[in-house]
Amino acid sequence: MELDRFEKLVDEALREFPKKLRDAIGNVAIVIEAFPRSKKVGEIEITHGTILLGLYEGVPQSTWGRNQGGIPPDKITVFQGSIESIAKSESDLKKLARDVVWHELGHHFGFGEDDLRKIEERRRK
């Protein structure tokens, strides 16, 4: 898929994020890369055989304090090639992009991996 079309999927995912939460997002840059760099995968200790679809880097809102001023924006990276490699259809690609954006935004709000997996499981039902 062309990058501009994938960017639109990511933008749609952000617009579909619940408005109350969307309005509370602060200081976040969302970028798209084809695949994660091997150095980054090594740094975050990804389990062998795991496909990294997205990555949150920053200080979650739940830990913000008075001395947080002047820090660079949090960064959410969405890995287009990784998502495309497991998507079975155009609609699957759209759903995966949305799930990744929402998952990484969850980290921005301070949710850990276990909590996010539980939330995602409830949303699927």
Image (cartoon, rainbow, N blue to C red):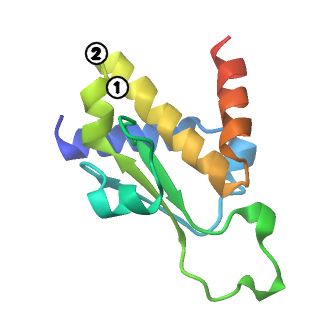
Q: Residue furthest left?
A: 2
| Residue 89's disc number | 2
Write the residue at 47% across / 54% down. 45
Where does the image place residue 90, in percent across and percent down from the top left?
Answer: 29, 19
Q: Residue at x 69, y 63 (%)?
A: 60
Measuring 39% from the left and 27% from the top, which residue is drawn there? 94
Taking the image as shown, residue 19 lies to the left or right of residue 90, namely right
Residue at 72 percent of width and 29 percent of height: 119
Q: How many marks?
A: 2
Q: Specify the quadrant that holds the N terminus.
A: top left
Q: Secondary structure at mark 1?
A: helix
Figure check: 70 above or below 3: below
Residue that sits furthest to the right in the current view: 66
The residue sitting at the top extreme is 125
Query: What is the C-alpha distance between the residues marked 2 and 1?
Result: 6 Å
Classed neighbour count for the residue bearing mark 1: other residues with Cα under 10 Å, few (<14), some (14–19), many (≥20): many
Q: Is residue 3 above or below residue 44?
A: above
* Disc 2 and disc 1 in contact, CB within 8 angstroms: yes
**Which residue in the structure is indicated by mark 1?**
93
Q: Is residue 94 above or below residue 82?
A: above
Residue 97 locus on image (x, y percent): 42, 34
In this picture, residue 14 sits left or right of residue 82? right
Q: Secondary structure at mark 2?
A: loop
Q: Amino acid at mark 1?
A: Leu
